[in-house]
Image (cartoon, rainbow, N blue to C red):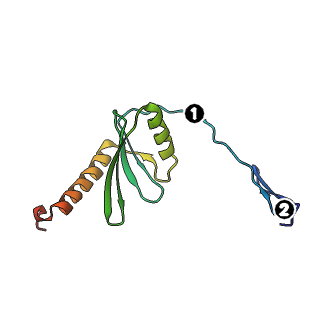
């Protein structure tokens, strides 16, 4: 596109190139479009590249179970108040793998991860297959 020209890429996005090699790009701000009530404990999946199985409990503790390659992770994070929890849940809801799940799905994944970690730490106790 030659200098001094304006090109409309979409209905909301136009770029302009000036003689100084400067590109003017519009900035958009997100705005709240609504709210939803979530009852704790809340079970969900999240993540963009790997699927995490999560539980946010009544004490504002987020428990996350996920696998990266051959490594399994179980993490927990304490939040101070409902505003921090709401911010975290809103952020997670933008992930590709976000979906509400049943408690039994989370408990199954947690149990699998716990069992695998236990047998990695205590291989002598693993049943013979």
Query: Are the residues flagged by discs 1 and 2 in contact, CB closer than 8 Å?
Result: no
112 lies left or right of 22: left
Q: Number of numbered discs present?
A: 2
Quadrant in the picture for residue 118? bottom left
**Residue 86 locus on image (x, y percent):** 47, 36
Judging depth in this view, the residue of 54 and 22 nearest the camera is 22
Q: Residues within 10 Å of mark 2 (few under 14, many from 20)?
A: few
Q: Mark 1 falls on what kind of element?
A: loop
User: Which label belongs to residue 9?
Assistant: none
Mark 1–mark 2 distance (CA, rounded to whole Å): 42 Å
Judging depth in this view, the residue of 33 and 60 nearest the camera is 60
Residue at 23%, 53% in the rendered image? 114
Residue at 50%, 41% in the rendered image? 90
Name the residue at the front extreme: 20
**Residue 19 locus on image (x, y percent):** 87, 62
For marks 1 and 2 on the same chain, the one whose residue lies earlier in the sequence: 2
Residue at 52%, 47% in the rendered image? 94
97 lies left or right of 126: right
**Residue 122 locus on image (x, y percent):** 15, 61
Q: Which residue is mark 1?
A: 34
Q: Mark 2 falls on what kind of element?
A: loop
Q: Which residue is mark 2?
A: 20
Looking at the rendered image, the quarter that the N terminus falls into is bottom right
12 lies left or right of 94: right
Looking at the rendered image, the quarter that the C terminus falls into is bottom left
38 lies left or right of 120: right
**Residue 115 locus on image (x, y percent):** 21, 56
Residue at 85%, 59% in the rendered image? 18
Above or below 16: residue 63: above
Above or below 104: residue 117: below
Disc number lying in front (1 or 2): 2
């Amino acid at each position: 596109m030659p200098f001094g020209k304006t090109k409309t890429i979409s209905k909301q996005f136009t770029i302009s190139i000036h003689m100084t090699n400067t590109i003017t790009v519009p900035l958009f701000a997100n705005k709240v479009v609504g709210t939803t009530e979530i009852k704790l404990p809340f079970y969900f999946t999240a993540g963009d590249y790997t699927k995490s199985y999560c539980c946010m409990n009544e004490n504002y503790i987020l428990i996350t179970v996920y696998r990266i390659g051959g490594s399994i992770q179980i993490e927990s994070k304490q939040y101070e108040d409902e505003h921090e929890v709401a911010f975290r849940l809103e952020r997670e809801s933008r992930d590709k793998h976000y979906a509400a799940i049943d408690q039994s799905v989370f408990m199954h994944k947690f149990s699998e991860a716990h069992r695998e970690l236990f047998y990695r730490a205590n291989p002598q106790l693993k049943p013979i297959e």
